[in-house]
Image (spheres, grey):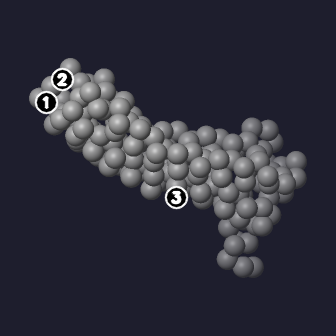
Amino acid sequence: MSFLESFGGLALALLGASLAVGLSCVGSAKGTGIAGEAGTGLLSEDPSKSGKVMVLQLLPGTQGLYGMAVFFVALIRMGFMGNALAVSEAMSVQLGLQFFAACMPMAIGGLLSAIAQGRVAAGSINILAKKPDDWSKGLILCGIVEFYAILSLLCSMIMLFSLSVPL
């Protein structure tokens, strides 16, 4: 029995889905934390900017939501919303590895893009502090990083929907 066979296909598939949501949420927590730290300084000086600071802090949190979406789609494709026992018995190691691989773009892309977006959001909060009328420029910069999180989401979703699942 090989190392992979001892895990089983279902365990590998669940590991991939769990990493997609887990790493994306870790990245979101780190990114929103970075932005939040920058925001507290500004809000201590000017509480009237709290709405704009919250928008900028919220942006790195979207990767966690994307990871959760990949997690749920993976579970649905594995058959967990139907007869999970039948799926667990039928899931080969090869299919489990395919699920694992399909979840990795969101896991890695979500982790790294959320942290990067948190740094951009922190810089955007500095724009808001110094030139409040130009804060939307920082918002656009955050959106550029978001684009790559969306590409990670699309890549994982396309691969998940392309898997041939024997149900």
Residue at the spot of label 1: 44
Residue at the spot of label 2: 47
**Residue at x-position 18% and y-position 29%:** 43
Specify the farthest residue to the bottom: 1
Instruction: Name the amino acid type tagged 1.
Output: Ser
Secondary structure category for the residue under label 3: helix
Q: Which one is in front, 26 or 6?
A: 26
- C-beta proximity under 8 Å, tags 3 and 2: no
Specify the farthest residue to the right: 167
> Residue 51: x, y in percent?
30, 23
> Residue 68: x, y in percent?
57, 42
- The Cα–Cα distance between marks 2 and 1, rounded to whole angstroms, is 6 Å
**Residue at x-position 75% and y-position 79%:** 1
- C-beta proximity under 8 Å, tags 2 and 1: yes
- Mark 3 crowd level (few <14, some 14–19, many ≥20, 10 Å Cα): some
- Give the label, 3 or 2, closer to the camera: 2
Image position of 143 (left or right of 44): right
Q: Which one is in front, 53 or 167?
A: 53
Secondary structure category for the residue under label 2: helix
Instruction: Name the amino acid type tagged 3.
Output: Ile
